[in-house]
Image: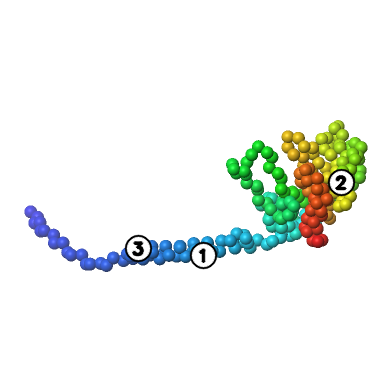
Amino acid sequence: MSLLYPTQSRPRPFRRSRRKPIAPILIGSLIAVAAIAAVAYLLWPTWQNRRAGDPDRIPVSVGASLFNVPTDAFRRKVQKHSGPQERVDLSYLYPSLEASNLPRHVSVETFDETRQPIDRIFLSIEAHHEALSPEARFRTIYPRYVDQVMAPQDGLATRPFRDASPYSREDLFVGDAPALVARCTRDAATPGMCLSERRVGGADLTFRFPRAWLAQWREVGDAMDTLTAQLSGKH
């Protein structure tokens, strides 16, 4: 027969809690976050302008020709880097010629039934790989497909392309001072657009702008001359 003895519980030693007070930590964290937010708010405009150290211009080589491209002119982010490229696509405000790749935002308040005017001149720089130059195309190709020249207006001559030609429903515009050669589609459901090409070294520059701008064709020609000189470093 086994004897059962009541077990005596030993008092546990008193242990101090090692947990740190939470309130002071939370208060300190909130103060630190508030301080960082205040500094960020004050410095935000500077960060936006510099965009993490982006330069004002980026040197780009197209067709072994060097162009100094404004950073804000690139239309495609993948092209926004220095070094050799096959092609770059750029955008400038007109008539200020300020580099701008930002899209136009149309709100419900500003939208209406009328067409929104185009305020950009677009430029593509592409390696030509010894293809026919714009000057040679003007001298040898276009004359095969144009009709007789129409009476010049304000120094700008117009020659429509024949309907059966590869440039059907387009017109050729030629000005002398400044030199301007532009091939333009005709106004239809969408406004007519023009392209004007120039060759610089190993690259061809193709400008695109609304046909309506030809009402001030000399200003447009000067704008293309200015952009060409700025990009190629000849200004």
Q: Residue at x 74, y 39 (%)?
A: 191
Task: Name the element at disc 2.
Answer: loop
Quadrant location of the C terminus? bottom right
Please, is residue 15 above or below residue 211 in the view?
Answer: below
Q: Could you say which quadrant of the image residue 107 lies in?
A: top right
Q: Residue at x 80, y 56 (%)?
A: 226
Which residue is label 2 attached to?
154
The amino acid sitting under disc 1 is Val
Mark 2 is surrounded, within 10 Å at the Cα level, by few (under 14), some (14 to 19) or many (20 or more) other residues, namely few
Measured as percent of width and height from the top left, residue 189 is found at 73, 34
Instruction: Say whether residue 160 is left or right of residue 52.
Output: right
Quadrant location of the N terminus? bottom left
Q: CA distance from mark 3 to mark 1?
A: 26 Å
Q: CA distance from mark 1 to mark 2?
A: 58 Å
Front residue of this view, candidates 215 and 230: 215
**Of pointers 1 and 2, the one earlier in the residue sequence:** 1
The amino acid sitting under disc 3 is Ile
Instruction: Say whether residue 195 is left or right of residue 142.
Output: left
Q: Nearer the viewer, mark 2 or mark 3?
A: 2
Which residue is label 1 attached to?
39
